[in-house]
Amino acid sequence: MGTPAFAVPSLEALISTGYKIVGVVTQPDRPQGRKKVLTPTPVKEAALRHGLPVLQPQRLRAPEAVAEVAALAPDLIVTAAYGQILPKSVLDLPRFGCLNVHGSLLPKYRGGAPIQRAIINGEKETGITLMYMAEGLDTGDMIARAVVPIEDEDTSGMLFEKLSEAGAKLLVEQLPSILAGTSDRIPQNDEESTYASNLTREDERIDWSASSRAIYDRVRGLVPFAGGFTTWNGEVFKIWAVAKPDAEYGNAEGTVAGNGGGQAPGTVLSLSPQGIEVKTGDGSVWLTRVQPAGKKAMEAEEFIRGGVMKPGTVLS
């Protein structure tokens, strides 16, 4: 059971190691892009390439959906970013239980956006937890964990790829002991738990009074799925890349008040081929890839050549 690209390596690993996949459950096809083309999930595409049966219930807890899964008579269910909570009627089906490949080091970052939240919060490491599923949200007993460092340049997209591969590796390493009944079952300490709720529109808004590092972490935690945004001339101005705050940038032409002293956070301090320098709560950051309202995403240098933004402009 899985939906996004994160889950595909786990499915491929199960197939390549010889396990019999009796069925794949994924979310329904959704409209994608500006033209709203109905698009299958990455997991469905992978399953069809291998000729596997695919189920796409709108609601897994619906009796007819539970009956479809039960008809497959699975010995084991593996989930990876499926996107729906498994009801007890499904959890009780397989004799070896239900496993989850979760993208954090539990009990930290339970919930739907653990990878993005870890980057946004400035964590230096995260990882994969392979766990038995329970009725609570990511509360089941842990089987094993794999630590993955978060590099300064990692975006959510890059970390998703690293963790998806780590998850697939951990899954196939642990399956023999799980099926033999000899795997570990480590209860989680609920007192150490934190939650990574799904991102909201407000999470994507840049708070210019935050530190330069916090803004950098927020943007890379939102890329490539949403990007950050601010407003300029009353319209949304999206931000897709920010230079690392300690990056060495030369003197820029058109600088306002040198290092931004006395300027309000969000003030555009300078424009140069290197990007757009914006005042923050503790200094400044350079925006290097942006998207004005109604335009495609572009390098900041290309946007600046249009001459429509001036030093002294305030983003909010």
Image (cartoon, rainbow, N blue to C red):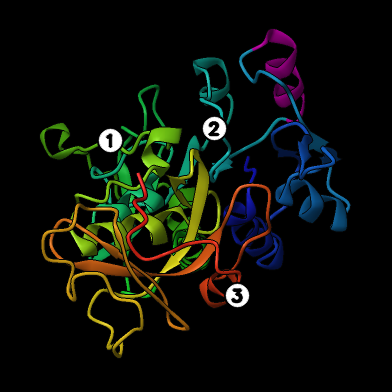
Seen in the picture, residue 297 relative to 288 is either above or below; the reply is: above
Front in this rendered view, residue 21 or 255: 255
Of label 1 and label 3, which has the lower sequence position?
1
- Residue 63 magenta: yes
The kind of secondary structure element at disc 3 is helix
Q: Which residue is labeled 1 in the image?
A: 195
The kind of secondary structure element at disc 1 is loop
Question: Furthest-top residue in view?
Answer: 63
Labels 2, 1: front one: 1
Residue 218 lies left or right of residue 14; in this view the side is left
Q: For the residue carrying disc 3, how many other residues have a C-alpha within 10 Å: few (<14), some (14-19), or many (20+)? A: some
Of label 2 and label 3, which has the lower sequence position?
2
Q: For the residue carrying disc 2, how many other residues have a C-alpha within 10 Å: few (<14), some (14-19), or many (20+)? A: few
Residue 145 seen by the camera: no
Q: What x and y, as percent, mark residue 237?
A: 51, 50
Residue at (66% x, 35% y) in the render: 74
Labels 2, 3: front one: 3
Residue 134's tag is: none
Front in this rendered view, residue 8 or 257: 257
Front in this rendered view, residue 312 or 275: 312
Q: Which residues are magenta?
A: 62-72
Residue 302's tag is: 3
Q: Which residue is labeled 2 in the image?
A: 95
Q: CA distance from mark 2 to mark 1?
A: 30 Å
The kind of secondary structure element at disc 2 is loop
Q: What x and y, as percent, mark residue 199?
A: 42, 37
Q: CA distance from mark 2 to mark 3?
A: 58 Å
Residue 229 seen by the camera: yes
Quadrant of the rendering where the C terminus is positioned: top left
